[in-house]
Image: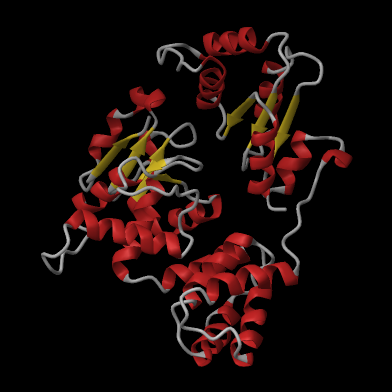
């Protein structure tokens, strides 16, 4: 079972879940919003936010899921735990992380640490071939495709996202020689080190047309686990000049939505609903895909949140998204001479 699947099952199995994704000020505000369904006053000081949180959870049984945590500061974890001790007996805190250090800090009892494993080779191959042969270009009965396909799927480390993404890339290649070339010339360059999966995902990014690369990198502006409004996203792409209208038979919006569908088919987005027309359609990015977007966007894009204040943003930054709780820190942003996007997230 992968980390995201575990969290989704927990969310479905509990009527009362609180979600938290960043430390520290924004987190307290988000927990209060989850419990009360109302955002706290943005002018409240930290002490006031803490008191609100204690009052809301006092004597109540809760399940708090902290998803994809990277903060390794023991002092911050100690302060956070003190805020949550007022819950009723049976309250639980579940932390998901890719950092063993975080697991050690947050839980002194190692028997409570569950290390999730990837898919078995057979399950990985089953998922791979379902996607890789979907377009009909590759022949699923051809032993040459099957042999090299199995070898590629095994290199994905049992991670469903990596399997889906690589399979989606290969589904557009028509010969077994192209698959073999991908394995020998590109996949072989990836060393067996930590971060290997991100390198594998990068291969699929490298195979994107240039116009889709720009569109994908722009999505770094959305925080992890953020539900993205597809229609608004396409409008942002249009405003940035990423959409190329080569003929008049389609509107620029239709072409942009086609770009989005291309990225969905390659597994760059997930949790996409079935909806047409596409007004109101939303999607999310997998955490690893967001990491990839951050990597390829480089210095051109940045999120200003509790982990990065506005003054930390470089003058070369072109695209910035901001958390509404941190508006007082925005003044330094306007020193950036190349700023083209200032995205205010709700």
Q: Nearer the viewer, residue 75 or 237?
A: 237
Residue 161 visible, this orientation: yes
Q: Residue furthest left?
A: 248
Which x, y percent locates residue 6? 69, 44
Which x, y percent locates residue 76? 65, 28
Residue at image position (60%, 67%) is 163
Vertical relation: 293 (above or below) 94? below
Coloured how?
A: secondary structure
Q: Nearer the viewer, residue 297 or 35?
A: 35
Which x, y percent locates residue 4? 63, 47
Vertical relation: 304 (above or below) 237? above
Q: Quadrant of residue 93?
A: top right
Residue at image position (52%, 88%) is 181
Which x, y percent locates residue 316? 28, 50
Residue 192 visible, this orientation: no
Q: Nearer the viewer, residue 265 or 216?
A: 265
In the drawing, does residue 259 fall left or right of residue 306?
left
Residue at image position (65%, 23%) is 16
Location of the C terminus (image quadrant): top left
In the drawing, does residue 130 fall left or right of residue 292?
right
Q: Quadrant of residue 129?
A: bottom right
Q: Quadrant of residue 191?
A: bottom right
User: For the image shown, how many numbered marks are present on the structure?
Assistant: 0
């Amino acid at each position: 079972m992968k980390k995201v699947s575990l969290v989704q099952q927990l969310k479905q199995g509990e009527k009362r879940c609180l979600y938290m994704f960043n430390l520290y000020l924004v987190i307290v505000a988000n927990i209060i919003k989850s419990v009360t369904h109302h955002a706290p006053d943005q002018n409240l000081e930290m002490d006031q936010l803490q008191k609100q949180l204690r009052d809301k959870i006092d004597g109540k049984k809760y399940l708090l899921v902290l998803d994809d945590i990277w903060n390794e500061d023991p002092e911050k974890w100690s302060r956070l735990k003190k805020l949550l001790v007022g819950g009723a007996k049976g309250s639980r805190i579940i932390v998901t992380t890719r950092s063993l250090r975080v697991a050690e800090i947050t839980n002194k009892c190692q028997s409570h640490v569950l290390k999730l494993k990837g898919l078995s080779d057979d399950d990985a191959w089953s998922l791979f071939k379902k996607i890789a042969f979907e377009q009909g270009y590759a022949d699923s009965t051809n032993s040459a495709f099957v042999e090299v396909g199995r070898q590629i799927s095994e290199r994905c480390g049992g991670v469903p996202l990596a399997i889906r993404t690589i399979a989606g890339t290969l589904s557009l290649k028509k010969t077994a020689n192209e698959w073999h070339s991908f394995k020998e010339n590109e996949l072989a360059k990836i060393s067996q080190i930590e971060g290997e999966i991100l390198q594998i995902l990068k291969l699929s990014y490298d195979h994107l047309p240039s116009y889709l690369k720009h569109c994908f990198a722009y999505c770094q502006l959305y925080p992890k686990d953020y539900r993205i409004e597809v229609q608004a996203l396409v409008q942002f792409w249009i405003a940035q000049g990423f959409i190329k209208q080569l003929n008049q038979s389609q509107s620029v919006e239709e072409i942009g939505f086609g770009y989005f569908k291309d990225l969905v088919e390659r597994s760059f987005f997930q949790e996409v609903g079935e909806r047409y027309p596409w007004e109101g359609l939303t999607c999310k990015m997998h955490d690893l895909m967001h990491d990839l977007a951050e990597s390829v966007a480089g210095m051109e894009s940045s999120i200003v949140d509790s982990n990065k204040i506005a003054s930390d943003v470089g003058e070369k930054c072109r695209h910035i998204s901001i958390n509404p709780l941190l508006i007082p820190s925005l003044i330094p942003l306007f020193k950036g001479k190349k700023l083209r996007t200032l995205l205010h997230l709700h």
